[in-house]
């Protein structure tokens, strides 16, 4: 059974930090990503990482503040979020793309991040 389990969300003041974790099981994935969806807005890409090469990409809105990383031994992907802003408030989702797929095809349940001003 494929599972992506996120953790690490919560309430933080503006300027603070949080680290999200995404533990994967049940399948080998080629790429992981973090997405977010704020109330009334569409889901947007935040960051992505290749499992084999470690190459990363980050949305312009989070560059220099958020960092995606991975721990191969733990089969876990992280999103370190620093200098958080109220506009970062959203439900954050971990996603994964199976080998041979062109799009993300597995999703976690989401974790709420709330940044107070």
Image (cartoon, helix red, strand yellow):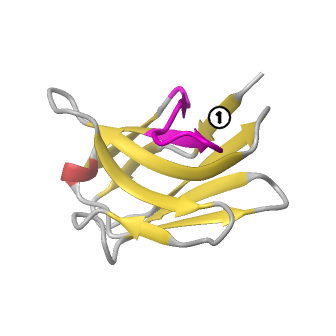
Crowdedness of circle 1 by 10 Å Cα count: few (<14), some, many (20+)? Answer: many
Residue nearest the observer in this picture, 21 or 13: 21
Image-based side of 114 in relation to 54, left or right? left
Residue nearest the observer in this picture, 64 or 15: 64
In the figure, residue 55 lies in which quadrant?
bottom right
In the figure, residue 92 lies in which quadrant?
top left
Image-based side of 79 in relation to 42, left or right? right
Q: Give the range drawn in magenta.
A: 93-109
Rendered view: 1 above or below 37? above
In the figure, residue 114 lies in which quadrant?
top left
Q: Residue at (27%, 36%) from the top-left corner?
A: 43
Rendered view: 39 above or below 62? above
Q: Residue at (35%, 72%) from the top-left corner?
A: 65
Q: In which quarter of the image is the N terminus?
A: top right
* Residue 81 picture location, percent across and down: 43, 63
* Residue 62 picture location, percent across and down: 29, 65
Rendered view: 82 above or below 9? below
Image-based side of 93 in relation to 98, left or right? left
**Residue corresponding to mark 1:** 4
Q: Residue at (47%, 58%) from the top-left corner?
A: 48
Instruction: Count every numbered label the image shows and give the total.
Output: 1
**Residue sitting farthest toward the left:** 40
Local secondary structure at mark 1: strand
**Residue sitting farthest toward the bottom:** 64
Rendered view: 9 above or below 117? above
Q: Residue at (36%, 66%) from the top-left corner?
A: 58
Residue 99 included in the magenta stretch of the image: yes
* Residue 38 picture location, percent across and down: 24, 35
């Amino acid at each position: 059974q494929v599972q992506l389990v996120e953790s690490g969300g919560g309430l933080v003041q503006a300027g603070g930090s949080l680290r999200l974790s995404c533990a994967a099981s049940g399948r080998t994935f080629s790429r992981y990503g973090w997405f977010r969806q704020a109330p009334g807005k569409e889901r947007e890409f935040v960051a992505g990482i290749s499992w084999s090469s470690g190459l990363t990409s980050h949305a312009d809105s989070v560059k220099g503040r958020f960092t995606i990383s991975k721990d191969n031994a733990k089969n876990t992907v992280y999103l370190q979020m620093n200098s958080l802003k109220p506009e970062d408030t959203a439900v954050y989702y971990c996603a994964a793309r199976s080998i041979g797929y062109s799009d993300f095809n597995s999703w976690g349940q989401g974790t709420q991040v709330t940044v107070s001003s």
